[in-house]
Amino acid sequence: MEFANPGFFWLLIIVPLMVGWYVWRSKKLQGSLKMSSVQGFLKVKRSKLSHLRHYSLVFRSLALIALIFALARPQSALSWQNSTTEGIDIVIATDISGSMLAEDLKPNRLEAGKNIAIDFIKDRPNDRIGLVVFSGESFTQCPLTIDHDVLINLFKDINNGMIEDGTAIGMGLATAVNRLKDSEAKSKVIILLTDGSNTTGSIPPVTAAEIAKQMNVRVYTVGVGTRGYAPYPVKTPFGIQYQKVPVTIDEGVLSNIAKITGGKYFRATNNEKLKAIYQQIDQLEKAKIAVTQYHKKTERFLPFAVLALVFLLLEFTLRNTLFKGALT
């Protein structure tokens, strides 16, 4: 319930003023009479209607309150909205090769990539998102889905060693493109994350990029790793030892993939930069949501106006029938 003219509620202050005036007037009209004894009046029975002597004040006050509510124009509001989302289909293709265990990102490249990608997924509830992992081979960890809880759980389950080691960037990209071949989304996107160069696989990265271009798939490539050397954990008989290994990201190939498909290449040398990259991609690939709102309001003042009239009629009728001639 809404009120079109809520300012009229200030008139409710008249009600206590009416009551105060009525009490003052009643006392003013009362007289005084001195008597030696009131014994003769004790046997007189009190009228059953005496408790209704203030009917006039009650009905007039109720009528005024109802009239003020009517003037405030109560309205019942019914609203609804039609939303049309032009969803974006996104496949995240992530490298899970052994080099992703390097700890130049914390706790390591693989875990940092997983955590930041999960935050990205949570911020895009209107899009279908899938997950492809690649190393020496590639496979689909999760097909395109709007059920992001399932996707996040599957994302958390990925780890190094699930498949043969290596870096098959072309295979990973081709598998991701294949997940989008039947998509009817107006925008199809792949986020490809790797820390190395293509060392294996039957499909060259540029060939996979050309296929993506033909299917109107835009690819954002992300090179993960610091510049120079990175600490890498190695198991030894004496426990985990760290070695400095060179960072060998093939930025030329990754930049070319992005250029061919109309995407963009990014370099993430630490957690903050990787997070910023996902945020930038999030802004570049915002889903378009058109929302049309409708409001329907129905006037509800009539019941209050009728109620005010009823109270006034009751007061008038009683005053001219049952209480005719009585002091009110």
Image (cartoon, rainbow, N blue to C red):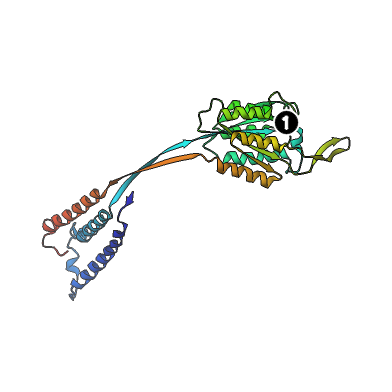
In the picture, the quarter occupied by the C terminus is bottom left
Viewer-proximal residue among 149 and 68 = 149
Q: Mark 1: which secondary structure?
A: loop
Q: Which corner quadrant of the image does residue 235 belong to?
A: top right
- In the rendered structure, which amino acid carries the disc numbered 1? Asn
Task: Looking at the picture, tell me which residue is in the foreground, 145 or 49.
Answer: 145
Against 187, is 22 above or below? below
- What's the residue at 20%, 73% (across, down)? 28
Q: Position of residue 196 (x, y in %)?
A: 74, 35
**Residue 29 or residue 218, whichever sits in front:** 218
Q: Name above or below for residue 41 compared with residue 144.
A: below
Q: Residues within 10 Å of mark 1 (few under 14, many from 20)?
A: many
Q: Position of residue 142 (x, y in %)?
A: 61, 29
Regarding residue 141, the answer to whether it shows in the image is: no
Residue 89 in percent (x, y) is at 55, 33
Q: Position of residue 282 (x, y in %)?
A: 57, 42
Disc 1 marks which residue?
198
- The image quadrant of residue 225 is top right
Q: Give me the residue at 51% from left, 31% from top.
A: 185
